[in-house]
């Protein structure tokens, strides 16, 4: 396959149909989405069969446990995939929305209208559900999209893509509105991220190596996050039961996700009271604790922590622990070592909670809740395209609104500038 020619063909198709998507009405878009969801439910066995081929190949090639966890589908996750598409159909259509209209002294009205971005390229690893999530969000937001999943999920992505094409065609929309790159050649990624003539923005969802490569090589703007080094800070006024439950869920519900807690900070005033039972819970679940000297004095099983550990997204049953003086030191630690993704405080002190919300420099900041809630579905966005730690355009879980932009509109009645 001539990769450059193939990718150019995908780009030209996407550009050609982007105007069709931009003017598609809400009813047609929702009809396509509901049709895709129905097809996913109806063809669950075919999707699982394709996924089993991917899993067999991944296990034989020695893919790490976190990647296999992300790759694996189940009957439950396929239902959730369909529900995610349906939830996007149920969301208000942002396209054409007009806001902030104001009269100016000249008599004109000035405001802004929400419009599609155009063509979105999405590069992701492992998780096949991203194929359905990304397609549905781009479609509802009026964008054409080019999806490049990881080579480890090629069979799963092909199976899901076929259903998306069918759903689009049945609803009278061009099948090329969503295109899944049908090659595992890494050169396809290199071409996709340089096709400024066709692609308006790239959304990468993957590991540090992928994001680092794209940051270095992409000529197309990115909406991205590099890592998910998330923290839970237990304040001196924290409720013991809340603290235990939040740490347990944040760290142990799933190890391979970007919103899993990787670091635990505990206020010195409450460390002797709360850290031992939390450590017992973590140890019982097989989590390795790497702690500072004060932590190790309270938790004999803890291993020595390093500076590198504090800055690491483990994606594994490992957690770094540090005893801090209080909220000031906790905020400073998070801003120094964190990845600006998601951080939580457990506290009964309103002032400390508000300080944490204001001063922690992260895309999602939480009070008395698990970091695992940092997710588009949980935030009411329907499915999400990814999580952004950028400060421009979109920050945090990127849903429909993050896949649109605004243009200025002016309404007049014959005014001229003097």
Image: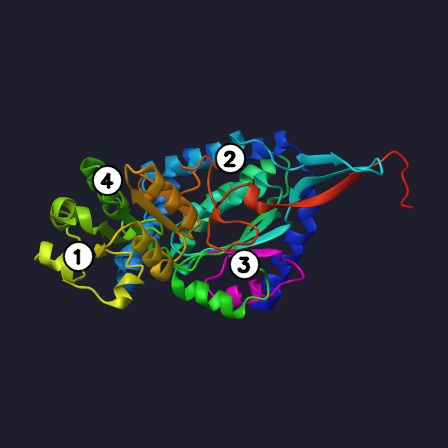
Foreground residue, 174 or 303?
303
Tag 3, which secondary structure? loop
Q: Which residue is mark 4?
A: 238
N-terminal of the pair, mark 4 or mark 1, is 4
Is residue 295 covered in magenta? Answer: no
For label 3, count other residues whose C-alpha is less than 10 Å away and answer few (under 14), some (14-19) or many (20+): many
**Label 2 SS:** helix
User: Mark 3 or mark 4, which has the lower sequence index?
Assistant: 3
The magenta stretch spans residue 184: yes
In the displayed structure, does residue 189 sit left or right of residue 318? right
Q: Earlier in the sequence, mark 3 or mark 1?
A: 3
In the rendered image, is residue 55 in sight?
no
Residue at the spot of label 3 = 222
Q: Label 3 to label 4, Cα distance in Å?
A: 39 Å
Pointer 2 residue: 88
Residue name at image x 68 percent, y 36 percent: 100
The residue pinned by badge 1 equals: 289
**Residue 31 vs residue 283, the one in the foreground:** 283
The magenta segment is 182-204
Rounded to the nearest angstrom, the CA distance separating label 4 from label 1 is 21 Å
């Amino acid at each position: 396959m001539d990769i450059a020619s193939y990718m150019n063909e995908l780009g030209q198709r996407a550009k050609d149909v982007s105007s069709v998507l931009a003017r598609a009405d809400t009813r047609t878009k929702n009809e396509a989405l509901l049709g895709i969801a129905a097809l996913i439910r109806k063809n669950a066995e075919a999707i699982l069969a394709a996924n089993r081929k991917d899993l067999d190949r991944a296990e034989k090639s020695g893919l790490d446990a976190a990647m296999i966890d992300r790759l694996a589908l189940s009957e439950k996750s396929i239902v959730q995939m369909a529900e995610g598409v349906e939830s996007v159909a149920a969301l208000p259509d942002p396209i054409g929305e007009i806001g902030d209209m104001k009269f100016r002294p000249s008599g004109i009205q000035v405001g802004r209208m929400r419009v599609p971005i155009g063509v979105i390229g999405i590069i992701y690893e492992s998780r096949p559900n991203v194929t359905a999530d990304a397609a549905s969000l781009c479609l509802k937001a009026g964008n054409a999209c080019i999806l490049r999943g990881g080579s480890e999920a090629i069979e799963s992505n092909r199976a899901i893509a076929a259903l998306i094409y069918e759903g689009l065609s049945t609803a009278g929309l061009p099948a090329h509105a969503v295109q899944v790159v049908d090659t595992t050649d890494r050169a396809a990624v290199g071409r996709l991220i340089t096709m400024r003539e066709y692609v308006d923005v790239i959304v990468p969802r993957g590991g540090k190596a992928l994001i680092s490569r794209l940051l270095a090589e992409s000529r197309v703007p990115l909406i991205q996050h590099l890592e998910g080094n998330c923290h839970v800070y237990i304040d001196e006024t924290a409720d013991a039961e809340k603290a235990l439950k939040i740490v347990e869920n944040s760290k142990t519900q799933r190890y391979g996700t970007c919103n899993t807690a990787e670091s635990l900070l505990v206020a010195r005033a409450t460390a002797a009271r709360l850290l031992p039972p939390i450590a017992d819970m973590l140890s019982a679940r097989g989590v390795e604790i790497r702690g500072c000297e004060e932590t190790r004095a309270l938790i004999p099983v803890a291993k020595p922590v390093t500076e590198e550990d504090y800055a690491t997204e483990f994606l594994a049953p490992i957690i770094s622990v540090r005893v801090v003086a209080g909220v000031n030191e906790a905020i400073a630690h998070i801003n120094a070592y964190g990845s600006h993704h998601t951080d939580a405080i457990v506290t009964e002190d309103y002032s400390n909670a508000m300080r944490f919300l204001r001063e922690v420099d992260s895309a999602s900041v939480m009070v008395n809740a698990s970091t695992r809630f940092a997710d588009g579905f949980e935030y009411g966005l329907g499915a999400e395209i990814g999580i952004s730690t950028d400060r421009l355009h979109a920050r945090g879980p990127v849903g429909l609104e993050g896949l649109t932009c605004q243009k200025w509109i002016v309404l007049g009645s014959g005014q001229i500038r003097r």
